[in-house]
Amino acid sequence: MSDTQAIPTEIKRICCIGAGYVGGPTMAMIAHKCPQIDVTVVDINPQRIAQWNSDELPIYEPGLDEIVKEARGRNLSFSTNVDQGIDQAEMVFISVNTPTKTFGVGAGRAANLEYVEKCARQIARVSTGHKIVVEKSTLPVRTAEAVKRILSSGETKASFQVLSNPEFLAEGTAIDDLLAPDRVLIGGECANAIESLVNIYANWVPRERLLTTNLWSSELSKLTANAFLAQRVSSINAISALCEATEADVDEVARAIGTDSRIGPKFLKSSVGFGGSCFQKDILNLVYLCEYFGLPEVANYWEQVVAMNDYQKRRFVTRILRTMFNTVSDKKIGIWGFAFKKDTNDTRESAAIYVCRDLLLEKARLDIYDPKVPQDQIKRDLMWALTDQGAMSSEQAQAAIEENVRFADGCLPSATDAHAIAVLTEWDEFADVDFQAVHQVMKKPAFVFDGRNVLKDMDLRQLGFDYYGIGF
Ligand SMILES: NC(=O)C1=CN([C@@H]2O[C@H](COP(=O)(O)OP(=O)(O)OC[C@H]3O[C@@H](n4cnc5c(N)ncnc54)[C@H](O)[C@@H]3O)[C@@H](O)[C@H]2O)C=CC1
Ligand SMILES: O=C(O)[C@H]1O[C@H](OP(=O)(O)OP(=O)(O)OC[C@H]2O[C@@H](n3ccc(=O)[nH]c3=O)[C@H](O)[C@@H]2O)[C@H](O)[C@@H](O)[C@@H]1O
């Protein structure tokens, strides 16, 4: 597909298509660590690009502002001119969204590869000379085959090499993860192309952490990594239900098993359920792939990880209902945290969306406080959740939100006159709250349902609260 001799191993100009949670921070880090490389991040969303060029970046991520401001204007730029970005680059990263398909074959499971395909077609149309195309988005195994075919069907004389370089950063710790990754994975077929990407990361990542594989192993490793991580959370959440029935304590169980070096301590924190844009999407994609390749037993095995997560979210609401005398109708519940984890403003697939939806369907009144998530985002999420699968019409959902959702600017206002508090994100500031004051302003009995076990050591029962955590 290309004359591999002609591929330079020292890259000077990079373009990244997609200025999202991955494209933005990843390219900012490359620009920060490699001042000799010009990095342009392009996106079809003009608002997002304007935000990247402003003082208010579109995503909240500790440490990101400093890195962007240091490199922007020097060797990092953000633009809506996708054609020009591609044209001027020797290496083009595809970092666009790959959401779960909502229509047609594979709806609800398969990844929607429409945006990736459009990028490949645009690269094929615009390019001249040699380009290395890097899959940064999370993709089903064998996608590179389709990308290669599209690239080689272009009418220009350009030639291409395709690499897979999945991203393993987690939101909230993206900068630390990019600065010191456990590993960087690069899959490819052409040694020169692989070396050119290895050389970029080698500017700050130790060589022994730069893993190279064939294309398909690299693509499949990304889905597998997320499936294994999510599976750990679902496994400990499954045990949390058993702990609640037996007076065992899930945090003690997690510590006891996590000290076994074969198991390890990470990703054993029981919670109201995992969220985020990727775990569910990637496991469902893995399930779909297994079915596609005729492996129903394997598909069923992984599907249970998502089923257990749905159960955990439902179980949390059921516990609230049962504890509060089987009704929350017209009762105010203070919701603390809406993001899918702390230190991010991202709400995609947040457990809070589903918990709040179920409470609203029970006619509870919610007063939501999240330090980083904008109110409009929360309203959009609830609107979607209430109308999804016909639970409510748009008009009913709109009315329910107007009537029963309020926003507080802190924990105390959110708790004022509330019958209960539900902690749905583990923001550090929740542990600094004056709980004596919170108890005073709440209705009695004052219920606290801690979906993250972050208030466990605060002696809330001593202060008079009816306190319930997860898994004890
Ligand atoms: N969010 C995360 O923490 C992680 C995400 N990933 C993967 O990275 C990929 C991107 O994820 P995010 O950055 O979270 O998505 P995102 O939704 O935040 O950003 C994607 C961006 O691509 C842009 N885009 C879509 N089609 C385009 C086109 N044809 N031309 C130009 N721009 C286009 C969109 O406007 C959007 O701004 C996904 O495959 C995801 O699974 C991987 C690791 C971590
Ligand atoms: O592909 C992706 O998008 C990314 O998905 C996850 O990162 P992320 O979703 O940003 O955040 P995580 O820290 O993994 O948390 C995911 C969810 O699991 C929950 N979780 C995590 C760990 C735990 O022990 N318990 C638990 O409930 C979190 O609260 C959160 O809701 C992976 O950790 C990243 O390696 C991967 O790159």
Image (tube, rainbow, N blue to C red):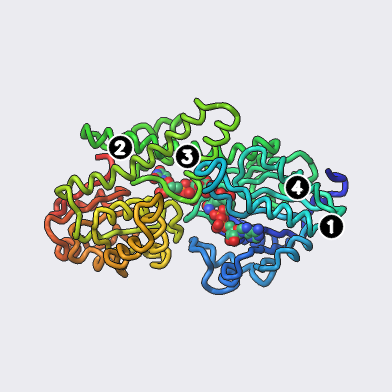
Q: Give the residue pinned by disc 1.
A: 128
Q: Is residue 342 left or right of residue 291?
A: left
Disc number lying in front (1 or 3): 1
How far apart, in angstroms, are the residues tagged by discs 1 and 4?
Answer: 15 Å
Please tell me in which quarter of the rendered image ligand 1 is found.
bottom right
455, 224: nearer the viewer = 224
Question: Which residue sits at x=24%, y=66%?
Answer: 412
Name the amino acid, label 4.
Answer: Ile
Q: Is residue 255 visible?
A: no
Are the residues at dot 2 and dot 4 in contact (C-beta closer than 8 Å)?
A: no
29, 102: nearer the viewer = 102
Vertical relation: 331 (above or below) 251 = below
Q: Is residue 261 left or right of residue 428?
A: right
N-term mark: 1 or 4:
1
Q: Give the residue pinned by disc 2.
A: 240
- CB at disc 3 and ligand 2 closer than 8 Å: yes
N-term mark: 2 or 3:
3
How far apart, in angstroms, are the residues tagged by discs 1 and 3?
Answer: 41 Å
Element under disc 1: loop
Circle 1 packing at 10 Å, graded few (<14), some (14-19), many (20+), is some
Element under disc 4: helix
N-term mark: 1 or 3:
1
How far apart, in angstroms, are the residues tagged by discs 2 and 4?
Answer: 48 Å
Question: Which residue sits at x=17%, y=50%?
Answer: 324
